[in-house]
Amino acid sequence: MVKIRLKRLGYKKNPTYRIVVIDSRSKREGAPIEELGYYNPKTKEMKLNKESAENWVKKGAQATETVAYLIKNCDENGALVYNKKQTQKLSKKAQAKLEAQKEQEAAAEAAKEEAPEGEAAEAAAE
């Protein structure tokens, strides 16, 4: 079975990887069938021949989980498109306050819809 996986290079605590096509029975640093690119996890720098990688997958090569992620998140030039999650962590008090505000707005909209047009105009005037 042929796999697309990472081949570790670099020295202690400073890894860099080559993305290689290799027989699954050979060792991690074994001779690859083809080198598709490189990846540096510290700097998020990557260069990948995406077209060749996709051709290998079509031929039946199994990409490891990490390599599949890298193939999926690279652009046409082979550079990694690193999207950071845009989530804010709110405290419990802030979350409760936000939920209460949403409920209040929903109740106000429901009251507007239920009230006839004449009463809504009077309420808006006050």
Image (cartoon, grey):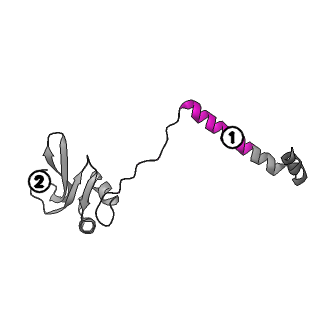
> Which residue does the image show at 80% across and 49% down from the upper left?
112
Residue 105 pos. (x, y %):
71, 44
Instruction: Report if residue 89 is visible in the image.
Output: yes
Residue 60 pos. (x, y %):
24, 65
60 vs 7: above or below: below
Mark 1 lies on residue: 103
Q: Which mark is residue 83?
A: none
Image-based side of 26 in relation to 112, left or right: left
Instruction: Report if residue 63 is visible in the image.
Output: no
Q: Amino acid at mark 1?
A: Glu
* Earlier residue among tags 2 and 1: 2
Outermost residue, front side: 125
The quadrant of the picture occupied by the N terminus is bottom left
Segment tinted magenta in the rendering: 80-107
> Which residue does the image show at 63% across and 34% down from the upper left?
97
Q: Amino acid at mark 2?
A: Ser
Q: Secondary structure at mark 1?
A: helix
In the image, residue 108 lies in the stretch drawn in magenta:
no
The image quadrant of residue 103 is top right
Mark 2 lies on residue: 26
Q: Secondary structure at mark 2?
A: loop
Front-most of residues 7 and 105: 105
> Which residue does the image show at 28% across and 63% down from the upper left?
78
> Which residue does the image show at 23% across and 62% down from the upper left?
61
